[in-house]
Amino acid sequence: MQISWRSSLVAGGLSAIAASLCCLGPLVLLTLGVGGAWVGSLTAMEPYRLYFAGGTLLFLVLTYRQLYRVAPSCAPDSGCADSSVQKRQRGLFWFVAALLLVLLAVPWLASKL
């Protein structure tokens, strides 16, 4: 069974969101106007952060492998044979990878403030 680069990238994104949920959750709640002393204690996901971060990096590696290492198998007149499509896919990968790495760095950056 072959995993598409899109599903791998989406899984990496969801994993990165879950990894930074311990720090972004309270921030989003405060931004929405929900406040109180209990917001600071929303750290239930903290013990799992390393697992989710590892999952994010794994899915990014799988996506990289799919886009750069595996030769595309498609018909000569299909969309995936066009080099501009491949360039857009790779550009989207690097854009999302940069966003995910920043998202993974949020808990570390928040602890430094």
Image (cartoon, helix red, strand yellow):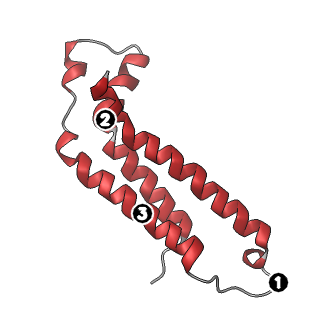
Few, some or many C-alpha atoms within 10 Å of disc 2 (few <14, some 14-19, many ≥20)? Answer: few
Q: Where, by quadrant of the figure, is residue 84 drawn?
A: bottom right
| Left or right of residue 111: residue 84 | right
Kind of residue at badge 1? Asp
User: Residue 84, relative to residue 78: is it above or below?
Assistant: above
Q: Residue at label 2?
A: 108
Numbered circle sitting on residue 77: 1
Q: Earlier in the sequence, mark 3 or mark 1?
A: 3
Q: Residue at label 3?
A: 59
| Left or right of residue 11: residue 71 | right
| Left or right of residue 40: residue 4 | right
Q: Earlier in the sequence, mark 3 or mark 2?
A: 3
Q: Position of residue 92 (x, y in %)?
A: 63, 55
Element class at badge 3 = helix
Few, some or many C-alpha atoms within 10 Å of disc 3 (few <14, some 14-19, many ≥20)? Answer: many
User: Residue 95, relative to residue 30: is it above or below?
Assistant: below
